[in-house]
Image: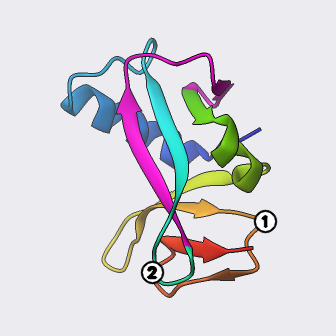
Amino acid sequence: MIKVSDIASKRVALLMEDEGFDSTKDYVRVGVESGGCSGLSYQLKFDHGTTEDDKVFEDNGVKIAVDKKSFLYLVGTTLEYSGGLNGKGFYFNNPNASRTCGCGESFSL
C-alpha cells in the first residue's frame, strides 16, 4: 500500500481542482522509471482512470493508481508534502530506498 500524509492529501485536492480533476473520482498516478542521479526516478501525475495493470489504493481521501512494476519499488511508501521557504513540494518517504539523491527525486535500492 502507498500512504498519503494529511498535508499531502490537502495539497493534492487543491492541485487536482486547479488542473480540472475531481479528487473524489480521479487518481494520483505514482510510478517509477529509470533515470535520475541515483538510478530510479519517481513520477507523479493526475489521471482520470486506471488500467487492468494498475494496483489501486485509497488513503486519506486520495485515490492512487500504480502500475504493478512500479508498485514493487513503492510498497510502504508515503507521499509527503513540505511547503514554506525551503519546502520540497511533494516527495516520497520510501523505506525501500537504500540511497536517495540530494533533491529527493531519485533513488536506488
Q: Residues within 10 Å of mark 2 (few under 14, many from 20)?
A: few
Which type of secondary structure does the marked residue at label 1 adopt?
A: loop
Q: Can I make out residue 82 in this image? A: yes
- Whichever of labels 1 and 2 marks the residue nearer the N terminus, that label is 1
Give me the disc on residue 24: none
x and y percentages locating residue 77 in the rendered image: 71, 53
Q: Can I make out residue 3 in this image? A: no
Is residue 91 found left or right of 84 in the rendered image? right
Q: Residue at x 51, y 18 (%)?
A: 50
x and y percentages locating residue 89 in the rendered image: 39, 62
Which type of secondary structure does the marked residue at label 2 adopt?
A: loop
- The residue to which callout 2 is attached is 103
Q: 84 or 1: which is nearer to us? A: 1
Q: Quadrant of the N terminus?
A: top right
Amino acid under disc 2: Cys
Magenta stretch contains residue 48: yes
x and y percentages locating residue 63 in the rendered image: 56, 25
- Write down the region rendered in magenta: 40-62
- The residue to which callout 1 is attached is 95
Q: 100 or 81: which is nearer to us? A: 100
Q: Quadrant of the C terminus?
A: bottom right
Q: Residue at x 51, y 75 (%)?
A: 104
